[in-house]
Image (cartoon, rainbow, N blue to C red):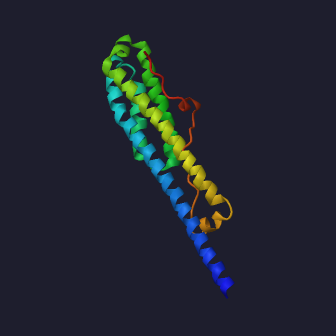
């Protein structure tokens, strides 16, 4: 009787410990996604300013400007990580094209507000990259815990599902935009 009671207490304590670890790891994933989302919003807030600065000097580059704005608008409306990742990758490529326009317009390249926006955008892109690494590391930890024995038993009982990674679809997106001096 004592052995059965002791074994029952051990099982309950083990269940509590594993459950709390799963909760902790899920919270880390949610917090990490929140960090990415904040940086994406910062990026989205910079885009209209950057487009306006480029428009002053390069009005005939309309298609590039419209593409960037359209991608920004689509991305702000999407909440699903599977859809948001590719959109953000395309948006990053569009921003690189927009920044590259500065090479063709020396006046734009010398404009202080454009240079400041370019620096801010570079900083945001770096922060997105750091946040994405932390998020993917948190997802890896949660998904490993959900998939490994004995934690998978508790994960299944409480219906834990693997979290999606925030993946880069384009290799050019793996590099932050360069600052042109």
x then y, percent, for residue 130: 50, 38
x then y, percent, for residue 110: 35, 14
Image height of 139 relative to 172, above or below: below
Image point 50% across, 34% down: which residue? Answer: 90
Image height of 39 relative to 80, above or below: above
Image point 40% across, 21% down: which residue? Answer: 61
Which residue sits furthest front? 2
Image point 43% across, 24% down: which residue? Answer: 98
In this view of the protein, can residue 56 be seen by the observer?
Answer: no
**Quarter-wise, where is residue 159 in the image?**
bottom right
x then y, percent, for residue 46: 35, 32
In this view of the protein, can residue 149 be seen by the observer?
Answer: yes
Image height of 15 relative to 122, above or below: below
Image height of 53 relative to 150, above or below: above
Q: How many circles with numbers are drawn on the protein?
A: 0
Which residue sits furthest bottom? 1
| In this rendering, position of residue 173 left or right of residue 119 | right
Task: Work out whether residue 64 or residue 75 is closer to the camera in this orientation and state it.
Answer: 75
| In this rendering, position of residue 12 left or right of residue 113 | right
Image point 57% across, 37% down: which residue? Answer: 169
Task: Work out whether residue 40 or residue 15 is closer to the camera in this orientation and state it.
Answer: 15
x then y, percent, for residue 7: 66, 78
Quarter of the image where the C terminus is located:
top left
Task: Work out whether residue 18 or residue 31 is closer to the camera in this orientation and state it.
Answer: 18
Quarter of the image where the N terminus is located:
bottom right
């Amino acid at each position: 009787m004592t052995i059965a009671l002791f074994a029952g207490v051990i099982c309950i304590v083990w269940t509590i410990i594993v459950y709390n670890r799963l909760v902790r790891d899920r919270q880390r994933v949610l917090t990490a996604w929140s960090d990415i989302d904040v940086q994406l919003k910062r990026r989205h807030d910079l885009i209209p300013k950057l487009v306006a600065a480029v428009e002053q000097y390069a009005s005939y580059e309309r298609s590039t400007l419209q593409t960037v704005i359209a991608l920004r608008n689509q991305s702000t409306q999407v909440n699903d990580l599977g859809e948001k990742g590719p959109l953000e990758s395309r948006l990053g490529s569009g921003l690189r094209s927009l920044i590259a326009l500065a090479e063709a317009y020396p006046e734009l390249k010398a404009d202080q507000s454009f240079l400041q926006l370019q620096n801010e955008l570079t900083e945001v892109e770096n922060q997105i990259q750091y946040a994405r690494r932390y998020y993917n590391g948190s997802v890896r930890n949660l998904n490993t815990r959900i998939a490994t024995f004995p934690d998978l038993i508790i994960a299944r009982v409480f219906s834990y599902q693997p979290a999606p990674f925030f993946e880069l679809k384009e290799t050019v997106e793996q590099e932050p935009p360069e600052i042109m001096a």
